[in-house]
Image (cartoon, coloured by chain):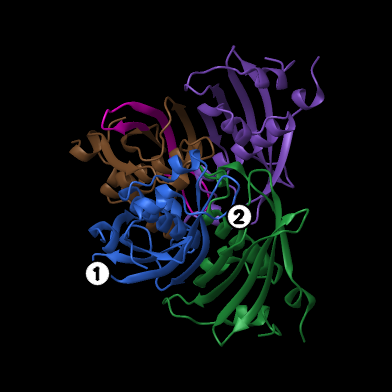
Chain colours: A blue, B green, C brown, D purple
């Protein structure tokens, strides 16, 4: 069975902070990755998975690949939403499909596909039981 | 004619700073984008193009697409080099092929293809003369 | 006359983002300055002063001094509020008294006094009319 | 006996990275704290103390107070040096006296006094033996 919070698109709202903007008066490219990570961690937390606690237990969630298309630039003062959906990708990978939309006009600013894996204490990819259980029923 | 600094791979050396590491004790994914950007800007500066000065003149160099594969994790104390080569991609795009190698064993940590464009003061893609001239002879 | 938003303490709510936490699993010291800056800029925006627009007009708001006491550490998952009050400090300086309180127990995490000045296009301290007018009636 | 690397001023050289500059085209105030932290950690590493390893062992080095005076602004392209000296401050505190000087004219850009403490696994201030031994002979 697929629970709602796994199927549905997970949304987190943000407002641009001025320190995230660079000399060109737009949000710096790396700051978008910060937004995307925070959105992924909020989604995982909604499934009961906390990045910090997992790290303490020797399970490191790492990003293995990022594809991001920057469509339009966020600027100082903008409010926006990050939308994330999560699917399994093979036996040991998670795939996050993410997009950023400006508020209130819902203009598409960025799309990204972020692939992640869990590494065990020896640095090897391994999907630990606690993650498998949390994602139980996830499509993909 | 292709000048040497355009053909050759441009190298910038770094050392991981602890504030770039996250709770999993590895460099956070967004920090790699910071490294890659600094390397690109150093390359551009070697061609006479300064990001900040261009921005003041109404020319914004922006990233339009990033593909990055995270192969291995940099950790606290690591020294590494970012290698960048630049090619033209169509009439109005620049393509940076970048990789990060740990020192001194030259282990490959990340590969990335970063596509950029220049936006004029109206926010439209346009390759201004100053950029065209600096990149004159660049292969692609 | 002193308007309410000048007299009262200005509040901005945040949630810790995991990329702001370091290897010790607490929010890194520099990230607190990011929080404090965002809170100051939100306060200034409530008075009609936008940092980015002022910069475009040749007026740079800069920090000249920071005193911060770190009382307790914010950790992953914490929600908190930054409280800011603004007073004039002499003819050309602004003083922001700021504190960070964890939610929901209101525990004091940090206190700070941040002094700022406006620099004109020649880099000289000068309180421009637009700022004076926005702060009209501010105590201090 | 006081060893040379404890008595002498410890220097780390940097170059401004463009992502550290904000819309006012100067280095953002929080980025200076990043520079200062990296310089402190390099000093500690020269004494055999690694922040990350200490954290893994349950010893968290934390900042308890920062006083920083921003004298002049670093801008894109600037090279600079952070100078740090370390003294004991009471039984359980370390005091770092730090300054930032632009290269090559040695212009003073920032002075700071940063106070730190070691917290044990229960979050209590405690100067562990490994730190005491590393700092043996330190003046203050």
Q: Residues within 10 Å of mark 2 (few under 14, many from 20)?
A: many
The stretch in magenta equals C97-126
Residue D134 pos. (x, y %): 71, 22
Q: Which residue is mark 2?
A: D17
Residue A105 bears which disc, if any? 1
Tell me where residue D124 appears, x and y as whole percent: 48, 18
The verdict on residue C108 being magenta is yes
Q: Is residue D87 left or right of residue B127?
A: right
Which residue: 78% across, 27% down?
A: D5
User: Which mark is on residue A51?
Assistant: none
The answer to which of A43 and A58 lies nearer the viewer is A58
Mark 2 or 1: in front is 1
> Observer-nearest residue: D123 or B120?
D123
Q: Is residue C75 visible?
A: yes
Relative horizontal placement of residue B23, taking residue D91 as reference (left or right): left
Q: Secondary structure at mark 2?
A: loop
């Amino acid at each position: 069975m697929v629970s709602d919070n796994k199927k549905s698109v997970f949304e987190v709202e943000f407002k641009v902070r001025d320190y995230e903007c660079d000399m060109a008066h737009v949000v710096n490219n790396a700051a978008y990755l910060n937004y995307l990570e925070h959105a992924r961690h909020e989604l995982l937390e909604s499934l009961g998975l906390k990045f910090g606690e997992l790290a303490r237990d020797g399970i490191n969630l790492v990003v293995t690949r990022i594809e991001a298309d920057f469509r339009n630039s966020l600027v100082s003062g903008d409010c926006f939403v990050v939308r994330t959906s999560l699917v399994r990708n093979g036996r040991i990978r998670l795939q996050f499909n993410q997009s950023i939309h400006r508020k209130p006009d819902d203009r598409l600013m960025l799309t990204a596909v972020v692939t992640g894996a869990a590494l065990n204490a020896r640095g090897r990819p391994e999907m630990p039981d606690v993650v498998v259980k949390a994602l139980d029923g996830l499509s993909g």
